[in-house]
Image (cartoon, rainbow, N blue to C red):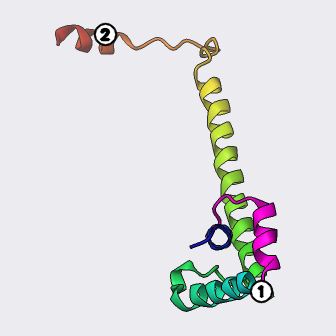
Amino acid sequence: MSDSYEVISAFIDDEPFDSGELANALADPSGRALLIEMIALRNLVQTDDALPAPMPRRGERRASIPGLMAAAAVLVALLGGYLAGQNRSAALSAEAPPPTRVLQAPAAWQEVSSVQ
């Protein structure tokens, strides 16, 4: 194989190549014919897995918006619940207020508790 075939092959295979050499190779009619043959051969042997995924239709793109909105709502609910829990735990850790009235147990209760 000549250098012109090598540079065309590198171009087709997405490998590094010298653009000047590619221009010289494509200036020759046999180089252009080789390029066309390589492109045709590549299309014949290419599997369906190697093909790019088709672009979603217009309606399919809009179908993802409700999903994104639902995910955002869940995120806001989780964040709100977390912050509410933080405020509640801060309130629960505070000291109890002083009593406004102290009750005395009857004397009979004190005798029962001392027997045990």
Q: Quick check: 99 left or right of 27? A: left
Q: Gap in Å between the C-alphas at discs 2 and 1?
A: 116 Å
Which stretch did the figure color magenta?
10-28
Residue 72 is situated, as x and y percent measured from the top left of the image, at 72, 59
> Do the CB atoms of the residues marked 2 and 1 lie less than 8 Å apart?
no
User: Label 1: few (<14), some or many (≥20) within 10 Å?
Assistant: few
Task: State yes or no: residue 15 in magenta.
Answer: yes
Q: Which mark is residue 3?
A: none
User: What is the quadrant of the N terminus in the image?
Assistant: bottom right
From the viewer's side, name the closer residue of 84 and 25: 25
Task: State yes or no: residue 92 in magenta.
Answer: no
**Local secondary structure at mark 2:** helix
Q: Which mark is residue 110?
A: 2
From the viewer's side, name the closer residue of 48 and 70: 48
User: Label 2: few (<14), some or many (≥20) within 10 Å?
Assistant: few
Which SS does the magenta portion mostly show?
helix
**In the rendered structure, which amino acid carries the disc numbered 1?**
Pro
At horizontal 63% and vertical 74% (from top left) the residue drawn is: 5
Identify the residue under disc 1. 29
Locate residue 85: give its quadrant: top right
At horizontal 59% and vertical 28% (from top left) the residue drawn is: 89
Mark with earlier residue (2, 1): 1
Relative to 101, residue 14 above or below: below
**In the rendered structure, which amino acid carries the disc numbered 2?**
Gln
Residue 35 is situated, as x and y percent measured from the top left of the image, at 69, 82
From the viewer's side, name the closer residue of 111 and 51: 51
At horizontal 65% and vertical 85% (from top left) the residue drawn is: 39
**Local secondary structure at mark 1:** helix
